[in-house]
Image (spheres, rainbow, N blue to C red):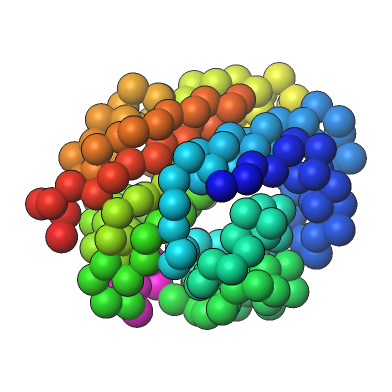
Amino acid sequence: MQKTSIRDIKCCLTTAITSSPKYATKNPISAQMIGAFFHAISKMMGRISFTRVLDAGCGEGLLIHCLQNQLHNVSVVAIDHDPKDLENAKLNACIADCRQGDIYALPFGNNAFDLVICTEVLEHMEDPVRALQELCRVSSRYILVSVPRKPVWSILNVLRGAYFHHWGNTPGHIQHWNTKKFISFVGTYMTVVDVRTPLPWTVCLGVKREQSL
């Protein structure tokens, strides 16, 4: 499957509808980092085959918007709990069936999707184990997940002058993993087959373990 270049991703972000300062940034360093993050996901998707995809916690649909060429002729469903983000997702991720939903109780049957994507979500969850179990339940094979990489994430926030009073921790991030701990966490429910560390994230691609059914 084809991959999407960082240049193409950055171009797509300039056309996206977003209220997020992170994704609407004009800072070239920040834009490069976000482009590299999406590009890492693109490369991981490029090594597998799939026809049914779920983006769980899609936010404003920016990942689908930027990687839409890789999702050509693929059935894509996107869910998010935030109705405001979902309105933008319907515009950005126009190739997807966008719905409101709860990651703790995904409204799909077992093995409904070949690939389940969940990026920049698990760090916000009170019960990430329950969330990961749901992601695995609706996947027939692949799960792709990402989280901020600690402590690098916090250090970079401090260096750019953000969240001093939180020691560089982004408000709303209640779970914290470095790469080794995150691989161990997701490895309980899936066999990790690829790991990428675009600064400052950890991204894991795995094949669902039988006990997670």
Q: Main secondary structure of the magenta part?
A: loop
Question: Is residue 134 visible from the viewing direction of this image?
Answer: no
Would residue 199 be found to the left or right of residue 113 on screen? right
Residue range in magenta is 102-107
Would residue 207 be found to the left or right of residue 119 on screen? left
Figure quadrant of residue 63? bottom right
Question: Is residue 15 visible from the viewing direction of this image?
Answer: yes
Residue sitting at 52 percent across and 25 percent down?
Answer: 197
Figure quadrant of residue 89? bottom right
Residue sitting at 25 percent across and 30 percent down?
Answer: 184
Front in this rendered view, residue 137 or 173: 137
Could you tell me residue 110's position as x and y percent? 23, 71
Would residue 204 be found to the left or right of residue 132 on screen? right
Front in this rendered view, residue 156 or 47: 47
Front in this rendered view, residue 127 or 200: 200
Residue sitting at 67 percent across and 32 percent down?
Answer: 36
Q: On screen, 170 above or below 197?
A: below
Q: On screen, 150 above or below 188?
A: above
Q: On screen, 107 above or below 53?
A: below
Could you tell me residue 60's position as x and y percent? 66, 64
Magenta stretch: includes residue 121? no
